[in-house]
Amino acid sequence: MQDIKQIRNIALFGHGKCGKTSLAEAMLFTAGKTNRLGKVDDGSSVMDYEPEEIQRNMSISSSFNNFSWKKHQTFLIDTPGDDNFINDAKFTSRVADNAVFIVGAVLGVKYQTVKIAGYVKEAGLPSIICINKMDRERANFDKTISEIKAQVPLEAAVCYLPIGAEEDFKGAVDIIQGKAYLFDKNGTVKEGEIPADMADAVEVAREELMEQVAETDDDLIEKFLEEGELTSSELLEGLKNGIKEGKLCPVIPCSATGNFGTELILNAINDLLCSPADRPAQVGTKPGSDDLVEMEPSLDAPFSALVFKTMADPYAGQLTILRVFSGSLKGDTFLNATKKNSEKFNQLFLMEGKDTTTVDNAGPGMIVAIAKLKDTSTGDTLCDQGSPIVYDGLTPIEPVMSFAVTTSKKDDEDKLFSSITKMLEEDPTLRLTRELQTKEILLSGVGQMHLLILGEKIKRKFGVELELHVPKVPYKEAIKGKARVQGKHKKQSGGRGQFADSWIEMEPLPRGGGFEFVDKIVGGAIPKQYIPAVEKGIIETMAKGVVAGYPMVDVKVALVDGSFHAVDSSEMAFKISGSLAFKKAVQEANPVLLEPIMDVSILIPKECVGDVIGDLNSRRGKIMGMDSEVKGEIVTAQIPMAEILEYAPDLISITGGRGTYSSEFSHYEELPGQLAEKVIADANKEE
């Protein structure tokens, strides 16, 4: 176990396609961890190794590795940037010590950039900003910096200016030391001359950096205002303190695929970012109470860790990935303080892409994996038996899109749902529910691609097909009028006959009134033992519906009269009689269909409000209110469920991916006549 001051724990964050995984590959190669530069585009990446990632050239799950650079050991987490898998970035921000935040010099700031930067800012992570793809056509360093300063909640401090751009990108000038570094293809740099035409730009950048650094410290601002200058050592020390406090983020230009500037980034990780010992103590609670407990990030403190990811493997079983916050994990047992039980394990692993390396122990800052724990899941706190602590759990992003799930082979149903259950342990953003009325099993996720890729994973890992269908809408039936009808059941076909005669009166109840049955029989027109049978026949018919097969609700039925036969009457006959009477009464009482209405809350940029409201109106939505927040405008509305089953991709399209929403059931309302006719026709056709 080395000195934890020489350990770095970093996570790569940024929008999709900004080059996070390519930068991870460049770091591993330059540090000598790998013997070739892995490429995402040709499927040779060490970090993106799942077939679904290789096929799409994108990360869909966090991956892990580690490397040594100049006597420092770095534990690396590469997070996805696509919105469908952004939960991994959110969870990683809770356990990382530092962030390397990547923005593409061509695409610039995207909506995910701002969202993920919010996670980094909220977690207070010391950060470096890398402007990647500087060798690409249309790469623009100044424009990208302007966008970051205008939109991203991280304070960009330019510490290196690029020498050249696009195909002429060949080096960077260190603003603090006043040196130029030219890039080699192997990721290293060599000192060179600052181009003469950059002298003014370097001077302006240094002046701006001095102002930014001085503003983070009272002593420095006083000196800067008096003398108008900070020395290189003061500038560097002030920058380090500003980074540690989350006030400044040094900016470094690079090209991950060209392996340009990687050494500058590796040096900055060692020299500017924090070791676990530099980070604040972790605060949790004593199990079973609200008493706060602190764990210092030191080897001498009791062991504590947080599980932030679980991976399901059909052969190796469940793989639990945890970040050690304090103490040293060694031996073969620990306490799961969240579940209040003891867990036993055999080995500790370091994840290195798809491979693993066994280690004897793990200290603060380390990311390790343990196989086949019995009762440990994502968000659990693991700790020393004698010093229990529970850290705040991890709150996953809420799913927004649901599909009904089936499998092509009836015999595979059990296998399918056991496979989904395993994937639920791996991915906390998934939900599996059963819709009681439609009898469909619903799988909910962050987006359509999220669920499609899940289906591919299940087929590959467990050999079973997952089919997704748009869910059925759980309509209900009701009445608007009153009716008085007779339900007579008479059957004579040799032997004992069947006879039952029921008169009922039907009227609507207020919405949400359910069902009410009233016995108004007088004078023994129907014997008392047969009256429950009439009610039972009505209840069974209500469940199946009369108009389109949907359950009938909010109705009051009074049994007012009838007749019976001493020999031929029976409970079954009166059950049938009640059913016949109910069906007849519904047809005469102006039946209607009711549709579920959802309360929807939509967070969108201000400039998208008009388009979103126009779209909601086209979906028969009622705008209930609007509210302004720092993150944008919140529109609240009530929208029929049928209109928002596939709303997620439409909102992405309207807002350029910057909109999010949540919904929950509110109430039922009458479905307009023309739409009701179509639903009834479809139901009858299906029947």
Image: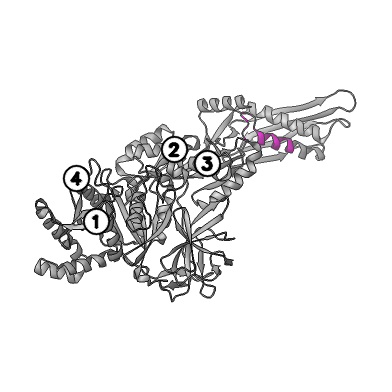
Q: Along the polypeptide, which appears first: circle 4 or circle 3?
A: 4
Q: Residues within 10 Å of mark 3 (few under 14, many from 20)?
A: some
Name, please, the residue furthest toward the front. 35
Would residue 400 be seen by someone viewing this image from the given angle? Answer: no
Label 1: few (<14), some (14–19) or many (≥20) C-alpha neighbours in 10 Å = many
User: For residue 562, which quarter of the picture?
Assistant: top right
Residue 647: mark in rendering:
2
Pointer 1 or 3: first along the chain: 1
Left or right: where 580 falls relative to 18: right
- Give whichever of discs 2 and 4 has the lower sequence position: 4
**Which residue position is annotated with label 3?**
455
Calculate the distance from the C-alpha at mark 1 to the C-alpha at mark 3: 40 Å
Contact (CB < 8 A) between labels 1 and 3? Answer: no
> Is residue 55 located in the magenta-colored stretch of the structure?
no
Residue 168: mark in rendering: 4
Picture coordinates of residue 146, whole percent (x, y): 21, 49
Observer-side mark, 3 or 2, equals 3
Q: Could you tell me the amino acid type at mark 4?
A: Asp
Which mark, by number, is residue 251?
Answer: 1
